[in-house]
Image (cartoon, helix red, strand yellow):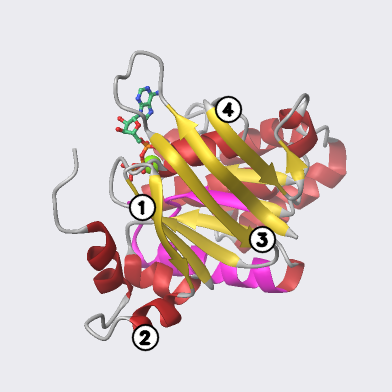
Amino acid sequence: MYSIAVQDLHKTYNGSLEPTLKGLSFAFPTGKIVGLLGPNGAGKTTTISILCGLVKAGKGSVQVLGIPQEANYRERIKRALGVVPQQIALFPQLTAFENLEYFGNLYGFKGPALKTQILALLEQFGLEKAAHKETGKFSGGMKRRTNIIAAILHRPRLLILDEPTAGVDVQSRSMILQFLRDYNRSEGVSILYTSHLLEEAQHLCEDVVIMDDGRQVVQGNPAALINALPACRNLEDVFLHFTGSKLRD
Ligand SMILES: Nc1ncnc2c1ncn2[C@@H]1O[C@H](COP(=O)(O)OP(=O)(O)OP(=O)(O)O)[C@@H](O)[C@H]1O
Ligand SMILES: [Mg+2]
C-alpha cells in the first residue's frame, strides 16, 4: 500500500504559458518519513496542493492512502490527511488556543475533550505559556509549531509538511524534527515533507524524490543514492548531480 502515488501528473496554471508539472510520477510506501525535494519552482507546493485537492491537475492520476482522486475526494481524505502549508495559516488576532479551537471545530471536535487535547499538544510543543497570547505576536518558530499542531489535532494517518523548518531557529527545528520522528515511530503516521535543507532531509527521510522542472529526476534512500555515486559525499552532492547548478527563477 502506498501513502501517496502520483502517475504522469501534468499541471499548467491558468494564464501561464509554461507547464509547472510535466509528467511527474512517484510513489511512497506507507509508514515512512519521505522527502519531496527540488529547487525553487520545481513544483513541490503545486504537487502538495494537488494531493490535498486544492488545485486541479490537468492530466494524470493521484492516490492518497489508496483513495483515488474522484468525486468527493476532499471530503474522503479530510480525516486521513493533515497538511502544514508553506505559508503560515493562523489568525494573527486570535490566541494559539483560539486558533486551535477553530481548527478543531472544523473537524467536528469541541468541548472539554478538544480543550484537553489542545492544552496537551501546546505543552508537547513547548507553547503552554503562550497558549493565550495572540499568534500575530509569536516568533517564526512559535508560529510554525502552532501550525503543526493545527494539522494533527484530528490525528491524521498521513501528514504532509511544506518546508516546516524554513525560517525557524535551531531549537525549534530540532524540536520539530524530533517530533516528526517520534510521531512516525509511535503512531505509524506516514509523513511527507519538503525542505531545501538537504542535510536535514538526508538524516530524516527513509526515501526521497528529487524533482526538477515538473518531473522526477531520481528516487531512493538517501544513503543508497550517495553510495551509488562515487563523487557524491552527501545528499546535497546527489541533488546537485541531478539538478545541476543553474540558478532558478
Ligand atoms: N497560483 C499560481 N499561478 C500561476 N503560477 C503558479 C502558481 N503557483 C505556482 N506557480 C508557478 O509554478 C511553478 C512551481 O511553483 P511551486 O510553488 O509549486 O514550486 P516549489 O517547488 O514549491 O518552489 P519553492 O521551493 O520556491 O517553494 C513556479 O514557476 C511558480 O511560479
Ligand atoms: Mg513551495
Few, some or many C-alpha atoms within 10 Å of disc 4 (few <14, some 14-19, many ≥20)?
few
Whichever of callouts 1 and 4 sits on the residue coming sooner in the sequence is 4
Label 3, label 4: how many angstroms apart (C-alpha)?
20 Å
Q: Which residue is mark 2?
A: 227
Kind of element beneath mark 3: strand
Q: Is mark 2 within 8 Å of ligand 1?
A: no
Work out whether residue 90 or residue 5 is closer to the camera in this orientation and state it: 5
- Circle 3 is placed at which residue position? 190
Q: Nearer the viewer, mark 1 or mark 3?
A: 3
Q: Residue at x 52, y 33 (%)?
A: 90
**Residue 54: image tag:** 4
Is 143 included in the stretch rendered in magenta?
A: no
Decide if ligand 1 comes within 8 Å of the CB at mark 1: no
Quarter containing the C terminus = top left
Identify whether 171 is placed above or below 159. Answer: below
Relative depth, front residue between 187 and 248: 248
Task: Name which residue type carries label 4.
Answer: Leu
Question: Which residues, given as a range, are shown in magenta?
Answer: 159-185
Q: Residues within 10 Å of mark 3 (few under 14, many from 20)?
A: many
Magenta stretch encompasses residue 168: yes
Mark 2 vs mark 1, foreground winner is 2
Q: CA distance from mark 2 to mark 1?
A: 28 Å
Q: Quadrant of ligand 1?
A: top left
Coordinates of residue 74 in the picture (x, y in percent): 71, 30
144 vs 100: above or below:
below
Q: How far apart, in angstroms, are the residues tagged by discs 1 and 4?
A: 22 Å
Q: Amino acid at mark 2?
A: Asn
